[in-house]
Amino acid sequence: MIGKLFRRTRPPAPALPEAELARRLTDRAYQCTCCGTVLRAADGAVRPEAPFGWKNPPDAKDDETFELGYMEMLTQSYARRDGNFLVRAFLPIPVIGTESEVFLGVWASLSSGHHARFRSLQARGEAQTLGEQLSWLYTQVPPISGPLLTKGTLVPYSDGRTPLYWITDEKHPFFAAQRDGMRAGDILDLYEVMGCEEMVKHLKA
């Protein structure tokens, strides 16, 4: 009992230097020091389940089921909601102090015609032939940011790879982040508020 009363409390672990956080965040082969898990934190760690405003989305289905024509549809790569046709994309953010980026999963809109063409070409691995597409961001990044709809550009890539999204609205808080980059610590704070607390814990271990 006396030993417990006088036992010294262990001081908290020192915060990791910013350079080490950046290395862990962008190293696609980094293994967690506490469990050995390969994290690949930069590869779309944040992947929203549904576009904003969809409180009870259905489970995501295979992409092929999108052609069934339901009024509301959510697949691994596409969504239809309230007349909007949406595509999963990655929003790149350079990590300051490195030559690497992280990729935040987002939803972006296309017109119904462009959406159909994108799906057709994406299935053949030829979506890049569409070129850049005017789009609107349907994910709040960060979660409390505004405006809800943000103008941007969807950039398709070859071989069926996930397209990229570039914000063109200078008023959006991530317009500057895409251009100038973010500190690794700030990116981890963003991951945490977007539901990736477990990954952040491993990165800081």
Image: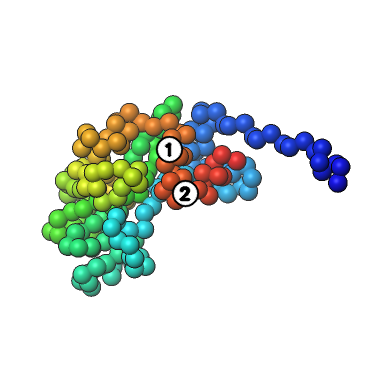
Secondary element type, mark 1: helix
Q: Quadrant of residue 175?
A: top left
Please rate how many residues cluster around mark 1, counting C-alpha atoms within 10 Å: few if below 14, some from 14 to 19, many from 20.
some
Please rate how many residues cluster around mark 2, counting C-alpha atoms within 10 Å: few if below 14, some from 14 to 19, many from 20: some
Amino acid tagged 2: Cys
Task: Tell me where residue 165 appears, x and y as whole percent.
Answer: 27, 44
Residue 131 visible? The answer is: no
Task: Report whether 173 appears left or right of 21.
Answer: left
Q: Earlier in the sequence, mark 1 or mark 2?
A: 1
Residue at image coords 30%, 50%: 139
Mark number for residue 196? 2
Looking at the rendered structure, the secondary structure element under dot 2 is loop
Kind of residue at badge 1: Ile
Front position in the image: 203 or 57: 57
Residue on which disc 1 sits: 187
Give the left or right position of residue 17, taking residue 1 as reference: left
The image quarter containing residue 141 is top left
Q: Residue furthest right?
A: 2
Q: CA distance from mark 1 to mark 2?
A: 11 Å
Viewer-closest of 20 and 126: 20
Which residue is rendered at x = 43% and y = 38% of the image?
A: 187
Q: Residue furthest left?
A: 113
Does 80 sit above or below residue 107? below
Residue 4: numbered disc? none
Residue 116 in the image, given as x and y percentages of width and height: 17, 60
Q: How many marks?
A: 2
- Residue drawn at the location 62% of the way across and 42% of the way down: 33
Where does the C terminus fall, quadrant-wise?
A: top right
At a point 30% along the width and 61% down the height, the residue shown is 54
Q: Position of residue 198 (x, y in %)?
A: 53, 49
Residue 167 image offset from top left, x and y in percent? 24, 39
